[in-house]
Image (cartoon, helix red, strand yellow):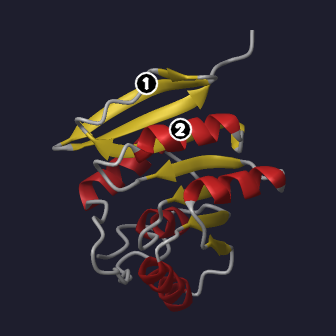
Amino acid sequence: MRIMTGKYKGKAIHMPKGIRPTQNKVRKAIFDILGDITGLSFLEIFAGSGAVGFEAVSRGVAELVLIEYNRDCQLAIRRNIESLAIKSCSLYPHEADQAVRFLHKEGRRFDIIFLDPPYYQGLSKKALQTLEAYDILAPDGFIVVQHFTKDKLPRENGQLVLVKESEYGDTVLSFYKKQASV
């Protein structure tokens, strides 16, 4: 797998065994929908290889935070950070909910939160609930959930509202924003 565009275009991403990488057409769609992300902060939960986050860095995000619990994936991420020589990147080697709680405790906020949990385990809904409970999304930020088509997500989850959904084969991208305050 390679980075598709931007500063690191064409650079290879090391992939750990046993993960389902985000397809190129889906990665392209994520960033086409988000538009200009220059200078924003990006959090990738269930990072795997970190490919989506590294694509974001290549496209100009100012800060990348990756959350990944699997040891093989952590090693691949560290190898990718080193090979790309990315300075504004940190890895939290914890379970997703634990890392989100920690980031909340630190008072961190992110402009874009991307999550692509393993399919068939109900983790997308659980992660949305955690993100609602521990608000780490910037006021005008987006949460992007990549999930299996049969894994239906709620239109609303507390103050998070589904604003766009796009299908790519058996993959769906669901975009959430915070409800506007009345």
- x 50%, y 64%: residue: 53
Mark 2: amino acid:
Leu
Mark 1: amino acid:
Pro
The spot of residue 129 in percent (x, y) is 57, 36
- x 78%, y 53%: residue: 108
Which corner quadrant holds the C terminus?
Answer: top right
Q: Is residue 174 left or right of residue 89?
A: left
Query: Crowdedness of circle 1 by 10 Å Cα count: few (<14), some, many (20+)?
Result: few
The spot of residue 176 in percent (x, y) is 51, 32
Residue at the left extreme of this rendering: 169
Q: Secondary structure at mark 1?
A: loop
Q: Is residue 22 visible?
A: yes
Closer to the camera in the image, 167 or 148: 148
140 shown above or below 86: above
Going from N to C along the chain, the mark reached first, 1 or 2, is: 2
The spot of residue 71 in percent (x, y) is 48, 81
The spot of residue 83 in percent (x, y) is 50, 91
Identify the residue under disc 2: 128
Proximity of marks 1 and 2: CB atoms separated by less than 8 Å: yes
Q: Is residue 47 left or right of residue 39?
A: left
Figure quadrant of residue 88 = bottom right
- x 30%, y 36%: residue: 151
Query: Crowdedness of circle 2 by 10 Å Cα count: few (<14), some, many (20+)?
Result: many
Q: Secondary structure at mark 2?
A: helix
- x 18%, y 44%: residue: 170
Q: Is residue 66 left or right of residue 170?
A: right
Identify the residue under disc 1: 154
